[in-house]
Image (spheres, rainbow, N blue to C red):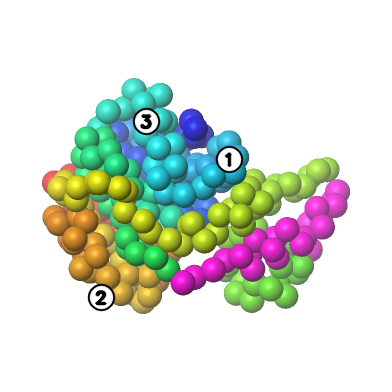
């Protein structure tokens, strides 16, 4: 599947992959920071943003989507950075097609299976009546019963397109059907460890990359540098953008 791409800047290619319920535009802070020195390609992963929908959704398939999209852009070797779901997709691409990845940066995710389950978010979003004239405030109120945290509601509602025919910019049915796949990790069969430079940038206040996961990271990415950003949680690029950008700039420029 060829994915939707937002492009900015000039220089060596740098590819950005967003997390679950996100889109390319959610990584705008990174695109703006890096477009001065890199040709930045921010991709909408399948069933997200303006990319096509597809019933199959697992990391092997999503990594192939990225590889196909890079080929269509004439890119043969890139710096690659992914957050959360995008980080797992980036790891899978590095393991499946190591020649495509010059340097790998992964933000707040590890190559392990997680027990998180966001099925309730999907159901709550699907329950909002998409009636003409729906306002963002009404949608937020409808979501509040199931999603208590206002920042998370705002994040999810970034996917809602209002107007005469409100719609979701995210494939809720496809994501809901594949939720268990998105929180799993399965090594690609027969893949060797990725021996390129790798940076695992984690939020010090996040529980997504616990110290006990470090061995799983280094087993698959033996050159991995694991750095924890003080004061940052899972959305570390939003919590501590200056520190995250500085760490990524140093890594990609090395």
**Label 3, label 2: how far apart the Cα atoms are:** 33 Å
Residue 211: image tag: 2
Where residue 88 appears, as percent x and y from the top left, is 37, 54
Residue at the spot 16% in from the left edge and 46% down from the top edge = 196
Asked if residue 63 lies left or right of residue 99, the reply is right
Q: Quadrant of residue 36?
A: top left
Look at 49% across and 57% down and name the residue there.
181
Determine whether 214 is above or below 248 in the image.
Answer: below
Image x and y of residue 29, in percent: 41, 51
Reading the image, the residue beneath label 3 is 70
Q: Is residue 59 above or below residue 227?
A: above
Residue 151, placed above or below residue 4: below
- Callout in the foreground (1, 2): 1
Element assignment for label 1: loop
- Spatial distance from mark 1 to mark 2, Cα to Cα? 35 Å
Q: Which residues make up the magenta segment?
A: 115-138
Location of mark 1 (residue): 54
Q: Are marks 1 and 3 in contact (CB under 8 Å)?
A: no
The residue shown at (14%, 55%) is: 223
Q: Position of residue 79 (x, y in %)?
A: 26, 41
């Amino acid at each position: 599947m060829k994915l939707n791409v937002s492009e900015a800047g000039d220089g060596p290619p740098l590819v950005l992959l967003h997390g679950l319920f996100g889109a390319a535009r959610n990584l705008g802070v990174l695109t703006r920071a890096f477009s001065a020195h890199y040709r930045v390609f921010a991709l909408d992963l399948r069933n997200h943003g303006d990319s096509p929908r597809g019933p199959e959704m697992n990391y092997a398939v999503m990594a192939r989507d990225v590889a196909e999209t890079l080929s269509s852009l004439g890119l043969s070797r890139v710096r690659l950075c992914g957050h959360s779901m995008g980080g797992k997709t980036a790891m899978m691409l590095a393991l499946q097609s190591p020649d495509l990845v010059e340097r790998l940066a992964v933000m707040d995710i590890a190559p392990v299976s997680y027990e998180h389950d966001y099925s309730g978010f999907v159901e709550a979003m699907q329950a909002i009546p998409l009636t003409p004239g729906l306002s963002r405030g009404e949608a937020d109120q409808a979501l509040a019963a199931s999603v208590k945290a206002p920042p998370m509601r705002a994040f999810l509602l970034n996917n809602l397109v209002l107007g005469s025919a409100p719609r979701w910019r995210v494939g809720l049915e496809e994501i809901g059907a594949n939720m268990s796949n998105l929180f799993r990790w399965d090594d690609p069969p027969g893949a060797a460890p990725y021996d390129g430079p790798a940076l695992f940038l984690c939020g010090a206040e996040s529980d997504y990359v616990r110290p006990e996961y470090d061995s799983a990271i280094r087993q698959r990415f033996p050159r991995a540098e694991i750095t924890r950003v003080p004061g940052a949680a899972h959305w570390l690029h939003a919590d501590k953008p200056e520190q995250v950008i500085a760490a990524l700039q140093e890594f990609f420029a090395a």
